[in-house]
Amino acid sequence: RAASIPSMLLQPLVENSFKHSYEEGYDEATLSITGERVGGSILFTVQNTGASITEEDLGRIRSAVYGSPSGQDGGIGLKNIYDRLRLNFKENASFQLDTLEGRGFRIIMKLPFMKDKQEGGNSDESTDRR
């Protein structure tokens, strides 16, 4: 079944991976994106094996994403994704940021499964039709 997901959900994460891995010299870095339906949800995992960050930097990024009104402390792309998930799905979506213990970075997003409009489900104008 086709699912309706918000547009521009994955692209900023791919761009971040290239910016913070390949452009910083991690030529052997890999990027993986997986998605699966789990019950009434879709679970996306995006991770790279390139550049990682310290726990301190992770805390700063989490504060910018989850707390500050405009992502002014960094993580603007991540903040935009988080805000759009909240706008579209309220508390029915989650957005988790984590390091891979110095071997990369991982983001896990969980959002409600919604059928694509073309298949008779409900969605709004801000979603892709896949």
Image: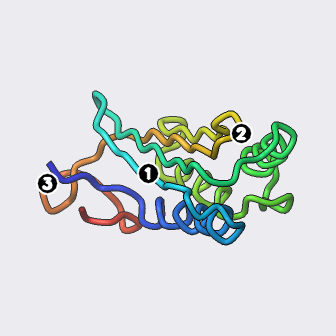
Vertical side of 23 occupied by 96: above or below:
above
- Which residue extends farthest front? 28
Residue 106 picture location, percent across and down? 58, 43
Q: Residues within 10 Å of mark 1 (few under 14, many from 20)?
A: few
Q: Mark 3 to mark 2: distance in Å?
A: 44 Å
- Seen in the image, is 70 located left or right of residue 79? right
Residue holding disc 1: 32
Q: How many marks?
A: 3
| N-term mark: 1 or 2 | 1
Residue drawn at x 35%, y 61% as measured from the top left: 124
- Which residue extends farthest top? 39
Q: Mark 1 to mark 2: distance in Å?
A: 17 Å
Q: Residues within 10 Å of mark 2 (few under 14, many from 20)?
A: few
Residue drawn at x 64%, y 61% as measured from the top left: 26
| N-term mark: 3 or 2 | 2
Looking at the image, is mark 3 or mark 2 nearer the viewer? Answer: 2
Task: Tell me the tag on residue 102.
Answer: 2
Task: Tell me the tag on residue 110.
Answer: none
Q: Residues within 10 Å of mark 3 (few under 14, many from 20)?
A: few
Looking at the image, is mark 1 or mark 2 nearer the viewer? Answer: 2
Task: Tell me the tag on residue 120.
Answer: 3
Residue drawn at x 81%, y 37% as measured from the top left: 55
| SS class, disc 1 | strand
| N-term mark: 1 or 3 | 1
Name the amino acid, label 3: Gly
Name the amino acid, label 1: Ser
Q: Quadrant of the C terminus?
A: bottom left
Q: Mark 1 to mark 3: distance in Å?
A: 31 Å
